[in-house]
Image (cartoon, rainbow, N blue to C red):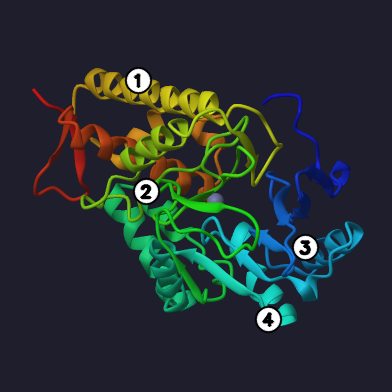
Amino acid sequence: MKSRRRPYSEQRPTDAGGGVWSVPVPIPGSPLGYTLVYAIESPAGPVLVDAGWNHPEAWLALRDGLSSIGMDVREVRGVVVTHYHPDHAGLAGRVREESGAWIAMHEADIAMVKLLRGFDAGGHREFRADMLRRAGAARVEVEEVSAHQPRPPALPDRTLHDGDLIDLPGRRLRTVWTPGHTPGHICLHLEDAGRIFTGDHVLPAITPHIAVYPYDRADVDPLSDFLESLEKVAALGDLEALPAHEWVFQDTAARATEIHTHHEEKLVRLAALLAEAGEPLTIWETAARMTWNRSWEELSAMLRGMAAGEAAAHLRTLEVRGVIRRTPEVDPVRFALHS
Ligand SMILES: [Zn+2]
C-alpha cells in the first residue's frame, strides 16, 4: 500500500481544474473509505460521474459537498454511472428524485441491475450457497453464507454503448466500454481536456476485483475482457486519470500496462501452482493455495468468497488459453495442467 492513502476524514471537495470538481463520498464500514464523485460543470447544470453509496451519511456528504463548491444537487442534469456497483450507482436514484436528472449506464450493466432487482434475499442466499458447494467449499463454509446484499441501484433511464457521447453541453465526454470488473464498466474520456474518468478500471495503487460468478461458469472470461480493456485505455495515450477511489494521477496508460503485467504474472504463478499440485484442484483448493494479502486462515468468509471468484477468473483465462483443462463429469469441478 502506498503512503498516499488518506482516510475519508482527511478528504475534501477539490477543484480538479477545467470545470471538474471531485467530491469524496464515504463508504461506511469499507476499508476503501470513499468514492470520488466528479461533478462537471455545464451551462445546463452539472453532470456527475458516479454518485456514491446509498447511505444517509453519504447522501449528506454528496449534497453538502456539491453545495460547498457552489453547486445545488437539485440542479444536477445527469448522472453517468461507471458501473452498477453500490459504491458508484447507489445514490444515483436519490439524485434523480431531487433533481429530475437522467441516469446513464452501459447496457450490459443495466442488464445486471435488472437481474439484481429480480432477486429476493432467499434467492440470493441459495445462489451463493450452491455456487460455493460447486466450487468445493467445506460444508461449514457453505452454511456460513449470509443473505445480506446491498439494495440494488435505481434503473437507469439512458442506455450507453461504446463510443457514445454523453449529453454534456459544450464538452466532449465519450463512453469507452471497458468490461472486466463488471460486464458494462465504462471509462469516460474527456476528449477536449486530455483526461479520463476511469471508475474502478484503472486505480493508482490497487486493482479492481475481477471474478467469475458463479465460480464454475465456462461461458465468460472476464479477466481476458479486463486485459483487453486495459490495452484499449492504454491505446488512448497519455491521459490524466480521474479514478473513483484513491487519488487523481498522471499517465493512465503506464498504470494500465502495469496492472496488465500484474495479472500476467499471477497467471504464470497459478499455472506453476497447478503443476506443483500434481493432481487436479477444485476452485476452492486453488484459491486456498494462492497468495492473498493475508493467509487463507485469516480471511473472513466474505473475503474467501471474493478470493475464490478471483481464482476462478484466472483459472478460466488459463483454460481459454489452452494451458489448463477442467476435468469433465466431476462434482465439484477440478482443474489440471494440460498434459
Ligand atoms: Zn466496483
- Give residue 287's position: percent from left, percent from top: 38, 36
Residue type at numbered disc 4: Gly
Q: Is residue 263 left or right of residue 334?
A: right
On the image, numbered disc 3 is attached to which residue? 58
How far is mark 2 from mark 1, CA to CA?
Answer: 25 Å
Which residue is pictured at 71% across the width and 56% down the height?
40
How far is mark 1 from mark 4, CA to CA?
Answer: 50 Å
Q: Which mark is residue 100?
A: 4
- Give residue 126's position: percent from left, percent from top: 38, 69
Q: Which mark is residue 138?
A: 2
Which residue is pictured at 55% across the width and 28% down the height?
238
Task: Tell which of 309 and 16 is nearer to you.
Answer: 16
On the image, numbered disc 1 is attached to which residue? 269
The local secondary structure at tag 2 comes to: loop
Residue type at numbered disc 2: Ala
Whether 252 is drawn above or below 119: the answer is above
The local secondary structure at tag 1 comes to: helix
Q: Kindly indicate the quadrant of the structure image that contains residue 225.
A: top left
Task: Tell which of 138 and 145 is nearer to you.
Answer: 145
How far is mark 3 from mark 1, CA to CA?
Answer: 40 Å
Dot placed on the residue nearer the N-terminal end, 1 or 4: 4
How far is mark 2 from mark 4, CA to CA?
Answer: 49 Å
